[in-house]
Image: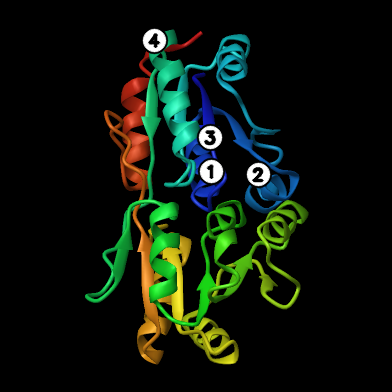
Amino acid sequence: MPRVLLLSGTSEGRPLARALVDLGYEVVATVTGEEARDNLFGALASDLTVEVGGFDEPALEAFLTSRKIDLVLDATHPFAARITSMAHRVCERLALPYLRYERPTWEPPAGTRLADTFAEAADIVPTLGRRVLLTLGARQLKHFAHLHDRVMLFARILPVPRSLEQALAAGFTSETILCLRPPFSQAFNRALFEEWRIDALVTKDSGQAGGVVEKVQAAAELGVSVLMVRRPRLEGIAAVRTIDEALAACRQACSPGLRR
C-alpha cells in the first residue's frame, strides 16, 4: 500500500489521517511535540505511526528515503513557511510527489488593519492603543519585545513549557501572560477583552479553523481595533483547501506504479 508522510501539527491532521487510513494508505504522521501527538493522534495510535520531532533538510531527505515514503502531504500551519518550503524543495530533489493542504483563509471585516510580517505589525502596534493583546503564537512574541515600555502588551499562548519560556524571554510576565488551550468561543474572547480592558487585538490569518473568526468578531462587538498579519507568500507551491481535495490529489499521485 502507498506510504504517506503527513506533516501535521494543526487540527486538520486528525481528519486527514483518519481519511487516509480509511482509504488504505499507510500513514506516518509527524508532530513537533509529545502533547501534539497525544491531542491529535491519540485516538488513532493503533492505525498509524506518529513521529515526534522536527527536521532539517538533510534529516528530512534521509527520512523520506529510509522510510520509503511514496507521497508527502504537507498539512502544517499556514505560517509554517520554513518547513513547507523545505519539504517542497526536498521532494523536488527526490522526484517524490508533494501535496500541500492549507486551511482556507478568512476575509476580515472592513476596518481591519493588515501587515505582511510580524516585524511590520510591531511597527504599527504603538498606534493602536494602550493595552494590546497578542494572539500570534509564543514564537512570534520576540518581534514585540522592544515595545514593553511604550504599550501594555498581553499575550495569550498555549499552556506548554516551551511557549511559556518564549513569552518570558520576550519580556512578558505572569501578569501579562494567559496560558490556555483553544478553542475559544466568541463569548469567551469578549469576556477576556473586557476583563483585560483591551484596546487592540493583534492576530494572524490562521483561518476559521484557527479561531480567528471568534476573536475578530468579539473585538468588533467591543470596538477593539484589530491588526491581522497576512500569511507568508509561498511562490510556486500550490495548495488544496479541503480534505476532499487533498484525498483526491493523493489518489491521483499514488498510482499503482508508485507502490513499493
Q: In terms of sequence position, does the residue under pointer 1 or pointer 2 come before the other?
A: 1
Q: Quadrant of residue 258?
A: top left
**Alpha-carbon span between mark 4 and mark 3:** 18 Å
Nearest-to-viewer mark from 3 and 2: 3
**Alpha-carbon span between mark 1 and mark 2:** 8 Å
- Mark count: 4
Categorize mark 4 by other alpha carbons within 10 Å: few (<14), some (14-19), many (20+).
few
The residue under label 2 is: 44
Q: In terms of sequence position, does the residue under pointer 3 or pointer 1 come before the other?
A: 3
Task: Tell which residue pokes out farthest to the front in this image.
Answer: 149
Amino acid type at image mark 2: Leu
Which element carries disc 3, helix, strand or loop? strand
Amino acid type at image mark 4: Ala
**Alpha-carbon span between mark 3 and mark 1:** 14 Å
Q: In terms of sequence position, does the residue under pointer 1 or pointer 4 come before the other?
A: 1
The residue under label 3 is: 7
Which of 30 and 90 lies nearest the eye of the viewer? 90
Nearest-to-viewer mark from 4 and 2: 4
The residue under label 1 is: 18
Q: Are marks 1 and 2 in contact (CB under 8 Å)?
A: yes
Residue 179, x across and y down, in percent: 69, 69
Q: In terms of sequence position, does the residue under pointer 3 or pointer 2 come before the other?
A: 3
Residue drawn at (34%, 21%), measured in percent from left and top? 253
Nearest-to-viewer mark from 3 and 1: 3
Task: Tell me, for residue 95, which label it has, or none.
Answer: 4
